[in-house]
Amino acid sequence: MAAKKTTGAPKRAPKKKTAGNPARDAALAVAQAGLDKKALQVEIIDVTGKVDYADYVVVMSASSDRQANAIAKHIDSEMSKKGMPATSIEGLPQGAWVLIDFGDVIVHIFHQDTRGYYDLESLWYDAARVEVTDAAKP
């Protein structure tokens, strides 16, 4: 019997969804940092096994471009303090849509009007959500 030939990039094994999951912990820290700056409609989407570029997507809204910039800068600062600096930040200083890449966690900060137009959450309508209340400080 011939060996099975595989093509393409190897698939990432899904990570266990435990409290000790570093990507989940980072997503919760990002959500908390957004909430610190009054981000609206914060949602954490577990995309483990659904996409190959991240384990979690955090989506949040801001009521203005200025607030979106403040949220993005605060998230970057707080995550850097935790030893997890962003590998890339796109969309500053415009602030209508800011994307921050932390590796296993991707953050989208939208102006409220822009978020509704792109509706990213619907891409992963069947993905598990992480309760944002878990991000609250003890």
Image (cartoon, rainbow, N blue to C red):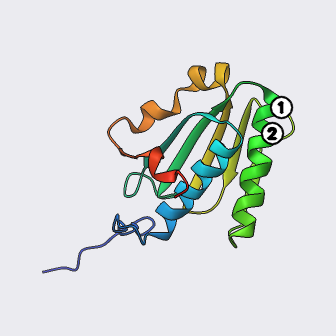
User: In this figure, what is the number of numbered marks?
Assistant: 2
Q: Contact (CB < 8 A) between labels 2 and 1?
A: yes
Q: What is the crowding at mark 2: few (fewer than 14 residues within 10 Å), some, or many (at least 20)? A: many
**Is residue 84 placed above or below 97 in the rendered structure?**
below
Q: Spot the residue most to the right.
A: 93
Q: Amino acid at mark 2?
A: Asn
Task: Label 1, secondary structure: give it.
Answer: helix
Depth check: give the residue in front, 74 or 128: 74
User: Label 1 sits on what residue type?
Assistant: Arg
Q: Residue at x 39, y 67 (%)?
A: 19
Q: Is residue 91 visible?
A: no
* Marker disc for residue 66: 1
Q: Nearer the viewer, residue 92 or 43?
A: 43
Residue 47 in the image: above or below residue 37: below
User: Above or below — where is 21 with respect to 115?
Assistant: below
Q: Residue at x 37, y 35 (%)?
A: 125
The percent coordinates of residue 95 (x first, y second) are 79, 33
Residue plotted at (74% across, 42% down): 71
Q: Which residue carries the number 2 mark?
A: 69
Q: Position of residue 91 (x, y in %)?
A: 78, 40
Lateral position of residue 135 relative to residue 5, left or right = right
